[in-house]
Image (tube, rainbow, N blue to C red):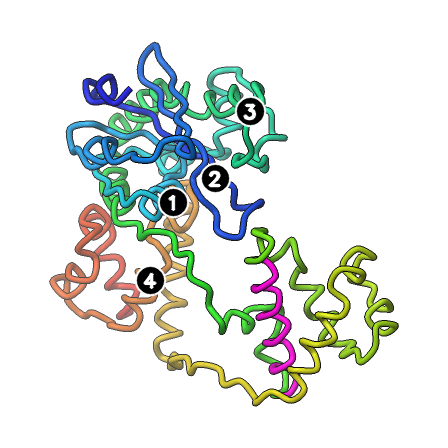
Amino acid sequence: MVRRLEACERIAVDTESNSLFAYQEQVCLIQFSIPGHDALLDPLAVDDLSSLAPIFSNPRIEKILHAAEYDVMCLKRDFGFEFDALFDTYHAARILGWKKPGLGNILEDAFDVKLNKRYQRANWGKRPLESEMLDYARFDTHYLIPLRDRLAEELQTGGHWEEAQELFKLLNQTPPATSSFDPQGFWSVGNAHRLDGKSAAVLRELYLWREEEAARQDRPPFKILGGKGLLAVLEANPVSLDQVEAIDKLTKHQVQRYGQALLEATARGRHAPTPRRAKTQRIDQATRDRYERLRKWRKETAKQREIESDVVLPRDYLWEIARKKPSTLPALREILAPLPWRFKTYGEAILETLHP
């Protein structure tokens, strides 16, 4: 398979992972398509995928993906691959203003193919895979090369080829997915930042218990107990199993299996020290005002092009420009160095918006 891929100028690629079914997700299937041939690779059955690395990093072999960020993150994390020469059909469609850029909608509109949506959330880590799942996976890449050719033609005729290419280059730099546990992650559960110190301590203990239980069962934490369940236990602050049973957000199975552990976690939280939240850098009002002007400019520009606002300029760049408030084109060029087309196209308008 590697020899066949190495001989191609373009390769369609996709992956399937088991994020909904495992504590630590992993890539469970890699799909490839070249003209006249589809291939499904089972990375759970192959010890060494290093022979694929030169293909993903080869600038002379274009890798075609749809919504590539997640695939790139996972492939970097699991196998250490580096990337060059990506073409993302999802982002290309958005640059062109396609209203329904999801792969299922595109395949149905362009190729009259309907994907079976039941497999979008399937367990790709189980073996053997059903034949219908294999067909679903194959169709994720089977049409990407002809779709790429159609999109490329429209990008070139519409004057958006350079705009798309600089975005594809940014995708190469997508960082690997992280698998590390954040013990401060409980602050992101509901409105935890509004809790008093004692309640935050209880929520932290519940959160830590859930993580340990998820790791023990090799299941995603939300399948042990969701965020609403954690907050319901926190609000009830039970001191007996009868009080745990009375929590309406818990199922009978959760009460039976985790009731005692929830009691112990809340008890630990009541006697635990108050957690300290990491300080966040405050944004001054002048910076917020500049960001708001830039956001309104971006929205109007996107409306004129009939595209989504983030296609014009990603949100992170708006904030960086607002913070650094460049007053000259060279200063702005330094901020937008990875986006030369956008600097060339929007640079003067951005400065006018910053300094009306």
Q: Earlier in the sequence, mark 2 or mark 3?
A: 2
* Circle 3: element type: helix
Residue identified by numbered label 1: 74
Residue 81 screen position, x and y as percent: 26, 42
| Amino acid identity at mark 2 | Ser
* Circle 2: element type: strand
The numbered disc on residue 133 is 3
For the point 45% across and 36% down, which residue is it? 28
Q: Earlier in the sequence, mark 1 or mark 2?
A: 2
The residue mark sitting in front, 4 or 2, is: 2
Q: Magenta includes 355?
A: no
Q: Earlier in the sequence, mark 4 or mark 2?
A: 2
Q: Mark 1 packing: few (<14 Cα in 10 Å), some, or many (20+)? A: many
The residue mark sitting in front, 1 or 4, is: 1
Residue identified by numbered label 4: 318
Residue 218 screen position, x and y as percent: 56, 51
| Amino acid identity at mark 1 | Cys
User: What's the distance in space between the residues labelled 1 and 3, CA to CA?
Assistant: 20 Å
**260, above or below 67, in the image:** below
**335, above or below 313, in the image:** below
Residue identified by numbered label 2: 17
Q: Which residues are magenta?
A: 198-214
Residue 94 screen position, x and y as percent: 40, 38
